[in-house]
Amino acid sequence: MNQLPLVSVVCLCHNHLSYLREAIRSVLTQSYPTVELIVVDDGSTDGSKEMIKAFIKNKNIQYIDIPSPIGNCAAFNLGFKKTKGDYIIDLAADDLLFPERILKGVNTFLNSNAGVTFCDVLNVDENGVELGTHFKRSHAGELQEAVPEGDVYIDLIKRYFISPPGMMMKREVLEKLNGYDESLSYEDFDFWIRSSREWTYAFTDEVLVQKKRVSGSLSQQQFRFKSRHQQTTLKVCQKIKELNESNEENSALRMRCLYEIKQCFKQGNWKLILGFFRLITKSN
């Protein structure tokens, strides 16, 4: 009998004391048997470090204690270097996995040639009140919209359609990309673009992850006034221009740049507008 593939979960914590225990437990209670967990604390000051040390005592959990914050991308890369799994999950400590998440994700990989798979995600507020699923569903839970699969490079240029907590990645993808780009302030857009240029994506049509919308989180900071994340978005769009190989792909980039220009006006990042306009000119 063939051994089941090992799945590695890198749980990233930065001042997530209120949610951390639940996130760790959601990994330990997976129905899938071969899972390793690496908890990475990125300079927490809220007592998370002490809680982690106490909670993982006498458990088969690896722990990386980063004294001062180095950022999400660099912290994940440290955790990834410790993993041994065939598949990788990047889990923020304010999110959690439902019990069948890893089993269903592995099945999707085994039934496809994808380098990355993703599932639907349940959004909740800080008090756990359900806000709805990422993808539109009926009251009976049936999917009500088309979800791109396969070669999704152009789709990912045009719009964000994947909820990051729903991703699982093949180890070889992260190894080939040398992990996340540590020069960036957030990782998902860049990872999607670079990985989808070479690998296909597959969708697991089930709600298997809970994402908590917490004020001050990385995802919420992206839409604040003068958000530093728009500089990262510009850098990724510049990478897209270098990766593009067709007129259709350049057209998608122009659409993305026009969208980002509107966001720059809304968020007061006026200095970045010229950079996006230059990309539109270059992609004509």
Image (cartoon, rainbow, N blue to C red):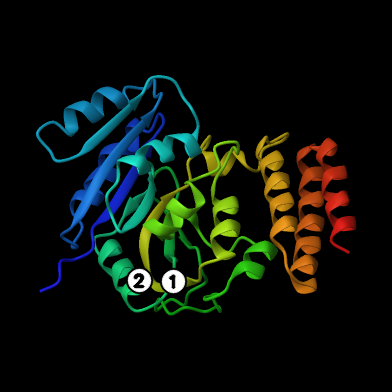
Q: Secondary structure at mark 2?
A: helix
At a point 72% along the width and 52% down the height, the residue shown is 237
Disc 1 marks which residue?
Answer: 114
**What is the C-alpha distance between the residues marked 1 and 2?**
6 Å
Residue 66 in the image: x percent, y percent?
A: 37, 25
At a point 34% along the width and 44% down the height, the residue shown is 10
Which residue lies most toward the front here? 176
Camera-nearest residue between 257 and 222: 257
Type of amino acid under label 2? Phe
127 lies above or below 197: above
State left or right for residue 73 relative to residue 210: right
Type of amino acid under label 1? Ala
Circle 1/circle 2 CB separation < 8 Å? yes
At a point 9% along the width and 34% down the height, the residue shown is 58
Disc 2 marks which residue?
Answer: 109
At a point 40% along the width and 58% down the height, the residue shown is 172
